[in-house]
Amino acid sequence: MIHRISIIDSHTGGEPTRVVVSGGPDLGGGSAAEKLRVFRAKHDRFRRAIVNEPRGSDVLVGALLVEPADKSCAAGVIYFDNVQFLGMCGHGTIGLVKTLEHMGRIRPGEHRIETPVGVVGVVLHEDGSVSVKNIPAYRKAGNVSVEIGRDGDAVGRLLPQPPREAEESSAVSDDRRSHGDAGGACGSKRPTIASRPAVASRPTIASRPAVASRPTIASRPAVASRPAVASCPASASCPGFVTGDVAWGGNWFFITEDHDLPLDLANVGRLTDFTWRIRQAANAQGFPEVDHIVLIGPAGSSAAHERDFVLCPGRAYDRSPCGTGTSARLACLAADGRLQPGEPWVVESIVGSRFRGVFQWEDREAGRVLPVITGTAHITSEGVLLLDEGDPFCWGIGGNDE
Ligand code: PYC
């Protein structure tokens, strides 16, 4: 038997989305969350068939269009990748909105999309860009240190280099030094700043050419004033430890500025290894829910405030700045008082594409923000996948074994 699956592919800032328009499994009635439960329990091989090789690749995110239970929604959707289902997906939602427009189902204006983690508002702008009014984002734990071991330190930090004065005097370097000073509080087990590879060799956000309209990143609050969570309580300076925030933006993230790796495409292998180690450490050391890791660094373009590298659950890296990751990042910046409601924050991806984020408080006490993420997507193809049950790789590589 041959199953015919209609799809429309797009990319959002380089990150691909494959929307399954028809031919998907019958998931019954109910909300997107209820349908996801059926999808996961009974049809996981369909997920593999759509996004895994030989029809897809590790980087592809799938989006199954479903009938929304909430009739105020233009569509329901369930996102998935090469290893699992995703609660929400920012780049995928931007791609989905362009796909619905391409199909003639929506026109520029405001719409609602039902996802398994709640209803998100979207705006298809006249210029073709798309804004996603995401579900509330929040920081679960700030200034968490996870131990990735000495090998991890070697992978994540640059070797010492001769100091460069301009960078040494930058605001970010100053801030890093203050982290190092506070690191002394960690006890004898912890090395002092002097034993770390030179901070001066690290490229800094402040060392980039200034753009008049760009707000500077306010320094991170002094480590001593931030709550300590994990085993290495205070500092970003411990070799073998990485300090960051655990936050929710529709998926779970560990977000860190505590590294020295250049966020360049040429460096993707090292970035992937390093972030994979962080993920394993975070999962083993109290945060099993974390399945996306974000490294933050200086932007390459003066149009952005920062660049990110995002490792997705299946070890592929996000070519876009990651919509749910940017939402989680906004919650962290807000929690630290480094970004104010309504202030735009532009994040550049590892391939140079950009999302613009902005937030309003939903509940300031609880640290919950309402992020809005804006980006663009382009349709790349439409077609029909053929799932031939006589094909040994009908359900994707490894999928027929289920
Ligand atoms: O844009 O939210 C996102 C996303 C999640 C995984 C890949 N992209």
Image (cartoon, grey):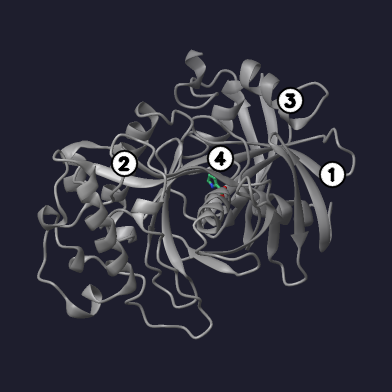
**Mark 2 = which residue?**
233
Q: Position of residue 267 (x, y in %)?
A: 28, 56
Nearer to us: label 4 or label 1: 4
Up/down of 387 relative to 62, above or below: above
Q: What secondary structure is found at the residue carrying circle 1?
A: loop
Marks 2 and 3 sit apart, C-alpha to C-alpha, by: 41 Å
Q: Earlier in the sequence, mark 4 or mark 1?
A: 1
Write the residue at 79% across / 29% down.
31
Q: From the viewer's perspective, is the residue at label 2 or at label 4 nearer?
A: 2
Figure quadrant of residue 64:
top right
Relative depth, front residue between 394 and 213 = 213
Give the label on residue 8, or none: none
Look at the numbered disc 4 and say if its residue's Cβ is closer than 8 Å to ligand 1. yes
Q: Nearer the viewer, residue 153 or 181?
A: 181
Q: Residue 51 location, x and y as percent?
A: 54, 36
- Name the amino acid, label 3: Lys
Q: CA distance from mark 2 to mark 1?
A: 45 Å
Q: Which residue is label 1 attached to? A: 73
Q: Tell me the residue at 51%/58% (across/down).
A: 333
Q: Are marks 2 and 1 in contact (CB under 8 Å)?
A: no
The N terminus sits in image quarter: top right
Marks 2 and 4, how far apart in space?
25 Å
From the viewer's perspective, tell me whether residue 100 is left or right of residue 95: right
Q: Which residue is mark 3?
A: 35
